[in-house]
Amino acid sequence: MKILHNASTLFHNVNELVGTRLIPAYESPSRITSILSSLTTHYSIMTVPTNLPHALSAAAKVHTPAYLLHLENIFASALASGLVDPNGCLLPECFPVSRLPLPKKSRPPKDLCARIGYYAFDMSSGIAEGTWVSAIASADLARRGALALAAGEDDTVFALCRPPGHHCAPDLMGGYCYLNNTAIAVRTLLDVLSAGEQVSVLDLDFHHGNGTQQIFYRERNPCYVSIHGEDEYPYFSGSAGEEGDGDGEGYNLNLPIPCEDVDWEVYEPRLKEAVEKLKSVETRWLVVSLGFDTFMGDPVGKFQLETRDYGIMGEMVGECGWPVLVVLEGGYVIEELGRNCLEFLRG
């Protein structure tokens, strides 16, 4: 197994608004340090630097140029304008929601505070001085992982991506996500694989990967399959009726689970259904968006999976026999995150 880490993913550290409380974000650097502490005694960790030109090129195949420019420069611009302290955090204050009478082709506002909201859909993705450096490092890990998998360096590659990415659309951040690492990995794979080799995404985070779905909704390669909490964040996507459109019709499968006493006995049948879908589209390469916020007691999840369940989950994925790139998404019970991750990889 090849495990990729970039120390620059630890630089991002922000606040978020939860209800009426402004708190340190649950998505914190300690997530990665927890995982590393559990994995280093069992696996060799490859620590790599960010290859910025290649990372930017890969990100540009998923995200718009204006969005990438915004993400890279907004904190420095706000700092120069006196809108934020060097150790501060930018949060949006106004959003261009669809029910407003907006022009069909709206432009980014000149006001910096308004621009933050223009490129965001919630208040859980603050921007600090280290956000861009960590986000592009995270994207680069996904890119490197995809290339390593395609080159046959290992049949399982784990990219320790942070911040996560599956909520991020081509020009929208949200849900702790700034660049869509999974989508970047998929685009990288498709660029180097032979034509017609089916790539699929299995999203196992508690929350629906609205960004990944949006990016690939009209495409048949990749196929996107998600198991997630029904009627949970991001609230406005993830229903079973969302099946893809155009060439992608039938290549998007959502398997929402009502959030009442969801233990492994309830979860396992949905995972079996997901695996059958992946087999039916003749998957050749698999990218797993792996979130551990399905764990019992997670502050932003409502499932009740236990540590041993992740071993069974990993075994079910591994038994399919496909080369697998695992991209880290959520999971916020820091004390157990490393053990849960280790259990999945052992499976």
Image: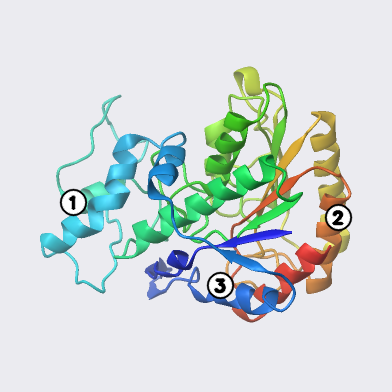
Tag 1 or tag 3, which sits nearer the N-term?
A: 3
Looking at the rendered image, the disc whose residue lies closer to the viewer, 3 or 1, is 3
Amino acid type, residue under disc 2 in the picture: Glu
Q: CA distance from mark 2 to mark 3?
A: 26 Å
Q: CA distance from mark 3 to mark 1?
A: 31 Å
Amino acid type, residue under disc 3 in the picture: Arg
Q: Residues within 10 Å of mark 2 (few under 14, many from 20)?
A: some
Query: Could you tell whether 321 is left or right of 337 in the image?
Result: right
The residue that disc 1 covers is 112
Amino acid type, residue under disc 1 in the picture: Leu
- The mark total stands at 3
Q: What SS does tag 2 mark? A: helix
Q: What SS does tag 1 mark? A: helix
Instruction: Say above or below: 247 vs 175.
Output: above
Q: Residues within 10 Å of mark 3 (few under 14, many from 20)?
A: many
Looking at the rendered image, the disc whose residue lies closer to the viewer, 2 or 3, is 3
Asked if one can make out residue 277 in the rendered structure from this viewpoint, the answer is: yes
Q: CA distance from mark 2 to mark 1?
A: 46 Å
Q: Residue at x 61, y 74 (%)?
A: 36
The residue that disc 3 covers is 31
Q: Dividing the picture into quarters, in which one does residue 1 lie?
A: bottom right
Q: Residue at x 60, y 54 (%)?
A: 232
Q: Residue furthest left?
A: 81
Tag 1 or tag 2, which sits nearer the N-term?
A: 1
- Quarter of the image where the C terminus is located: bottom right
Q: Which mark is residue 268?
A: 2
Asked if one can make out residue 297 in the rendered structure from this viewpoint, the answer is: no
